[in-house]
Image: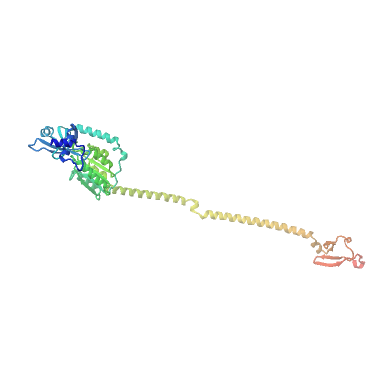
Amino acid sequence: MSTESSAASAAPSTSAEHPWPVRTVARKIGDWIHRLGAVWVEGQVTQISARPGTSTAFLTLRDPSADVSMSVTCPIGLLRSIDPPLREGASVVLHAKPSFFLGRGTLSLRANEIRAVGIGELLARIERLRKLLAAEGLFSPARKRRIPFLPQGIGLITGRASAAERDVLVNAQARWPHVLFKVLNTAVQGPQAVPQIIRALSTLDRDPAIDVIVIARGGGSVEDLLPFSDEALCRAVSAAGTPVVSAIGHEPDTPLLDHVADLRCSTPTDASKRIVPDVREETERVRQMRDRGRRALHGWVDTQTRLLNQVRSRPSLADPLGPIQRRSDDVEVHRERARRAVLGLLAKDQAELAGARARLTALGPAATLARGYAVVQFTDEEGNLQVLRSVSDIEDGARLRVRVADGAVGAVADSTPPAEGERS
């Protein structure tokens, strides 16, 4: 067998024509692992197997922040020497050397020292994680979302048939009877709590009917509440798209989940009061708002009525035709004054015109003609009628036009003087 091992070790590589047997591959892997030195490992014990009559105890060590676990073997005497006795869910630090079991091809850690992590160390680690998450902004109030006033669906993550589940359901349904819950029961302590809660959180977060998620657990010791200070759970809650409510333990209990959640409630009962309104309180509030609205509306109507009455009492609106009638009377008075003034002016002008006409008539030729006089006209060389003012203006035989009061007659000029008898 050693010859085969030396030949296999000397072989530079393998091929389909020259493969290595399983034992060679397993031996090479074992050789590499056995060269590794001992290491200090921290984790959470999820399973302990120490059968009576055996010299070796078997443990399963899990990483709380990841779904990774390894098998650990140790002398059973080492396990029994731990005080207080080691139990599942405990956090430990152990010194171990990697070991490869050739027959089954399995890897395990062979522990020669196991130290249980005390409460003080756990609290110190939680404090360091608190500062880390706070520095990353996971606790910032700016990133916290508002809880819906009346969520259509509520997801509840809690232990099966637990007091926390009963408190949340009973109190919430008493406040709002038609509230809908989707309950996912998980482990709330121990090594399986964190992965189960994360899976339930992911399931509810993907459900479009869920508006808010409540993670609830009753009170317990620091060790019992350790899963709710787990870094993986805190980051999962921070990354969730649905608002998350933390209702862990009692008022003094403050796991890291309380700081990361969008709303922290002191107890599960407090959570039921914070996530749904009280139908009686809301009904009373609606009634009060309705009364306030009615009073406000009546007050507004009364105010507007008084304003309208004040406007209507003004003279312009109390008697809208009065000013028009008064203006109409003024217009009629002024129109009558204007008519009388125009008539007086016309009468005066007519009198002056009549006087002028009388004077003109008295001074005109018509009045003279009426008294027996006549106007003699002759035709000049240009054919125009001219008034005869001198006998030298015409010659004998010239045709004359004699105008009297009631007409005109023709005559012929004769320079012979008339006889005495004819003059008389």
Residue 360 in the image: state x and y as whole percent.
Answer: 77, 59
- Choose top left, top right, bottom left or bottom right for residue 36: top left
Considering only vertical position in the picture, is 31 above or below 404? above
Name the residue nearer the viewer: 41 or 185. 41
The chosen color scheme is rainbow
Q: Residue at x 56, y 55 (%)?
A: 328
Q: Residue at x 52, y 54 (%)?
A: 322
Q: Quadrant of the N terminus?
A: top left
Q: Quadrant of the C terminus?
A: bottom right
Residue 227 in the image: state x and y as whole percent.
Answer: 21, 39
Name the residue nearer the viewer: 180 or 279. 180
Residue 344 in the image: state x and y as whole percent.
Answer: 67, 56
Name the residue nearer the viewer: 352 or 123. 123
- Choose top left, top right, bottom left or bottom right for residue 220: top left
Q: Is residue 85 left or right of residue 360?
A: left
Residue 283 in the image: state x and y as whole percent.
Answer: 29, 49
Q: Residue at x 72, y 58 (%)?
A: 353
